[in-house]
C-alpha cells in the first residue's frame, strides 16, 4: 500500500486521539508511545482484517505474561503494528485519499502547510521545501536501508536504487511546488471540502501537536460532533475502528 503524507498524518492524528482518550487501555497507550513508528508504518506490511485480529489476540494473550524487557519491547511493536493497520482500515473508508495523483498532491501539500509550517503568514520558497524533503529522504534511507543488499548482483541493486531515487526526486519537486502555491491549495480545499480549519476536532488536534494540554471534556465534545470535511471524517472513522479494537482488547463487548 502506497501511503500519502495526508494518510500517514491522519493516522498519526488517530494515535493522538487514542493516546489522550481516558477510555484507551494502558496496553494501547504504551504501544502507541513506545512504538509509534511501527504503527505509522503499518500500511507497508499489508495486514488484512483476519491477520489484524490474529495479531491483536496474540498481543492480548501475551500482554500479562512475565516477559523480559526485550520481549516486551517486541510485543509493543507488534501491538503498535496492529493498531496502525486497524486505524488505516478506518481511514480508508474515506475514499478521497484515493482520488488520484493530483488530489493526493494537493492534500499532502495542504496538510504539510497546516502541521509543519510554523509561520503560516510566511510561505517558504519551493527550493526551501525541496531541500527539507530531500534531507528527510536521505535521512530515512540511512535509517531504514542496509548498504549490504540482499541480492548477489550488486550492479542491479544500484540500478534499482537509482531508478527509485529519480522517481522520488520527481515527486519531491512536484510536492515542493504545490506546497508553496497557497492560492491553489486554498481553492482545492474549499472546492473539495477536504479540510475545514474551524472544526472542533481539527482545532483540538492542532493543539495536541503543539504540546498543549486538553481536557477530557474537550476531547469528548470534539469526538461527538460529526465530521464536516473529508479529513475530519477520515480521522473520526479511523478513531472509531481503533476504539472498537481497544474495547475488544480489554474484553469488553461492543
Image: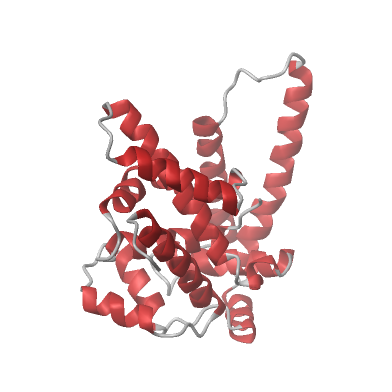
Residue drawn 27% across the image and 28% down it: 69
Image position, residue 155 (x, y; %): 77, 19
The answer to whether residue 180 is visible is no
The answer to whether residue 63 is seen in the rendering is yes
Residue 137's spot in the image, x, y percent? 56, 42
Residue 178: image location, x then y, percent: 63, 66
Quadrant assignment, res 183: bottom right
Q: Is residue 236 left or right of residue 221?
A: right
Which x, y percent locates residue 171?
68, 53
Residue sitting at x 60%, y 75%: 185
**Residue at the (30%, 82%) spot, across then down:** 221
Q: Is residue 57 above or below residue 103?
A: above
Front residue of this view, candidates 137 and 152: 152
Taking depth in this image into account, of 245 and 222 the one nearest to the observer is 245
Q: Name which quarter of the figure residue 65 lies in.
A: top left
Q: Residue at x 52, y 42 (%)?
A: 135
Amino acid at each position: 500500500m502506497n501511503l500519502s503524507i495526508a494518510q500517514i498524518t491522519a493516522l498519526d492524528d488517530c494515535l493522538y486521539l487514542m493516546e489522550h482518550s481516558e477510555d484507551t487501555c494502558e496496553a494501547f497507550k504504551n504501544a502507541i508511545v513506545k512504538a509509534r513508528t511501527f504503527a505509522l508504518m503499518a500500511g507497508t506490511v499489508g495486514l488484512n482484517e483476519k491477520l489484524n485480529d490474529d495479531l491483536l489476540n496474540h498481543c492480548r494473550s501475551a500482554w500479562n505474561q512475565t516477559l523480559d524487557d526485550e520481549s516486551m519491547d517486541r510485543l509493543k511493536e507488534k501491538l503498535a503494528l496492529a493498531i496502525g493497520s486497524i486505524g488505516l482500515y478506518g481511514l480508508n473508508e474515506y475514499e478521497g485519499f484515493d482520488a488520484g495523483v493530483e488530489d493526493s498532491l494537493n492534500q499532502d501539500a495542504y496538510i504539510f502547510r497546516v502541521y509543519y509550517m510554523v509561520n503560516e503568514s510566511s510561505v517558504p520558497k519551493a527550493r526551501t521545501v525541496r531541500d527539507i524533503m530531500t534531507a528527510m529522504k536521505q535521512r530515512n534511507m540511512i535509517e531504514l536501508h542496509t548498504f549490504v543488499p540482499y541480492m548477489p548482483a550488486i550492479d542491479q541493486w544500484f540500478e534499482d536504487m537509482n531508478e527509485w531515487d529519480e522517481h522520488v526526486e520527481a515527486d519531491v519537486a512536484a510536492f515542493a511546488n504545490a506546497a508553496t502555491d497557497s492560492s491553489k491549495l486554498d481553492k482545492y480545499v474549499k472546492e473539495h471540502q477536504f479540510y475545514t480549519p474551524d472544526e472542533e476536532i481539527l482545532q483540538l488536534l492542532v493543539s495536541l501537536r503543539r504540546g498543549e494540554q486538553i481536557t477530557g471534556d474537550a476531547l469528548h465534545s470534539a469526538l461527538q460532533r460529526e465530521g464536516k470535511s473529508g479529513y475530519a471524517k477520515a480521522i473520526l472513522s479511523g478513531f472509531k475502528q481503533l476504539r472498537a479494537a481497544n474495547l475488544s482488547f480489554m474484553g469488553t463487548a461492543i
